[in-house]
Amino acid sequence: MERVDYAGLRDDELMDRLERRDMGAFEALYDRYGDLVYSVALRVVGDTYVAEDVAQDVFLRLWRRPEQFDLNRGKFVTWLMSVTRNRSIDERRSRGRRLRHEALPAAEDEEAVLPSGNERDDPALATVLSDERAAVREAMDVLPAEQKLAIQLAYFGGLTQQEIANKLGQPLGTVKTRIRLGMQKMRGALEERRGSNRGH
Amino acid sequence: MPMVECEGFREDIDAWALGALEADEASQLERHLAACDECSRLAEGAREAAGSLALAVPLQAASSSLKAKVMAGAAVLAEERPQRRRGWRYWPAAAAAGIALGAGLVAWGAYMQTEVNDLRDENARIEAGATEQSERLATASSRIVQMTAARREDLLAADAVTEIVTQDDVARLAMSGTSAAPEATGRYVWSRTAEMGALVVRGLPPLTEGTRYCLWLVYEHDWVLGGQFDVDADGDGRLIVTDLEIDADETGRLEGFAVSVEPAGEVTKHTGETVLRATLD
């Protein structure tokens, strides 16, 4: 019997195995990203029960259709986060925004929607993503608060630019500019930090 | 592709990557991306950056039961391949035994969730189509509502079973079909600490109109109603038993369990034919 050190495999190697219906690979991916998927879902839907529903769905979709991930189009974790975010936003919308998180933070409450430094330690995730996570946080830190808030309201709040403008009482053009400049700065900071290291 | 046209679209690429464009704007941009390699390359970069935002979210620990649900759900889906069918008979054989009952119900919840999401996908495809599909959309939406309600019920049942099977005093008993239902089988799991029980049955005969199955807790001096339930086309069904008020002085010792066919509506006495029976040692 082949003995596989799943925890030592890269994401793309685990995904290869997943396409061959390798349950060990699936479990390793869950162990690596389960808390992150759950945390992103929780961040969007604001309800632990619903967040678990979303996380469960994301992983079962991954198990059923691993071929939906295309290695040529980017990193696995980015794709997984995108799937999680979109699924969470769908859930939030389907519930008519009745979730606890309905009251999106106002501009003065921006810290409520921004990542903080306080979090639990996850060794499985730390081995593959600690640099990446630090890079994103640092990239976000360089943004002016209003740009950061507009980006967060779009990504985690699922709001369109027009909805953000309405919420913040700002002209649509201002919001568009904040998002565009903020993303440009963040992308630049990320690329600078990451360099050529593509890791997992 | 003329650069001037690209410039207009490129202003929207970041908002698109964040999901912040209106639907018509997004469609327009996506049509352009399909035809423009350079803008498409930029869009991939923007999408990668947007996806990275999630990495900065403070980590929260998911419950251990989430992993159990996910793994059990995957096991169910693995069993279904290559021919997807629903039904208890396609569960892993081990699910029939004792503690695996809990995982089985959990898995069923997970399975139902994927069914709901399949329907959501179908709904999305229909929406992307034209208005002539509206009737089909309405049907699918109605099914989604039904499936979502069923899923919620399944997950609640799964939670109840988890509560039962994690108690130290969990007990289980297999039930056999009587001559009225020789093919039927059942299993009842319960815990006095949790004050709950869970019944799973298979192969019961279809109910006639105006009747339901009832689970009875058979005591020395009385039969106490545990609850009513229906079965699906395969005769499979389940019931979570809670909130029973038992006065041991009146009922005497618990002797076993029974399932009978009773008239639908309020039932207080066992009058119908017994189809499943189990006796405690």
Image (spheres, coloured by chain):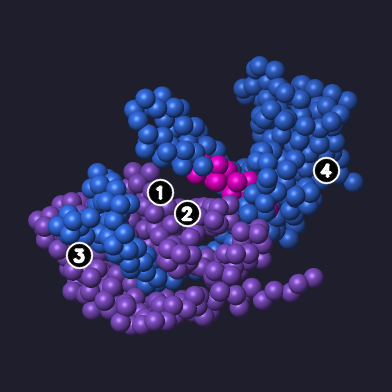
Chain colours: A purple, B blue
The residues tagged by marks 1 and 2 sit, at their Cα atoms, a distance apart of 8 Å
What is the count of numbered marks? 4
Determine crowd level at label 4: few under 14, some 14-19, many 20+ residues with C-alpha closer than 10 A: many
Judge by depth and name the residue closer to the eye, A34 or A12. A12
Real-space Cα distance between discs 3 and 4?
A: 64 Å
Mark number displayed over residue A54: 2
Highlighted range, magenta: B103-117
Which chain letter goes with mark 2? A
Q: Are marks 3 and 4 on the same chain?
A: no
Q: Mark 1 Cα within 10 Å, few/some/many (few <14, many 20+)?
A: many
Q: Which mark is residue B174?
A: 4
Q: Is residue B33 left or right of residue B273?
A: left
Q: Give the mark nearer the N terminus: 1 vs 2.
A: 2
Question: Which of labels 3 and 4 is toward the front?
Answer: 3
Q: Nearer the viewer, mark 4 or mark 2?
A: 2
Query: For mark 1, what is the residue?
Result: A91
Q: Position of residue B168 (x, y in %)?
A: 73, 61
* Contact (Cβ within 8 Å) of mark 4 with mark 1: no
Apparent side of residue B168 relative to residue A75 in the rendered image (left or right): right
From the viewer's perspective, is residue A26 above or below residue B120?
below
> Under tag 4, what secondary structure?
strand
Q: Chain of mark 4?
A: B
Circle 2 crowding by C-alpha within 10 Å: few under 14, some 14–19, many from 20: many
Tags 4 and 2 on a common chain:
no
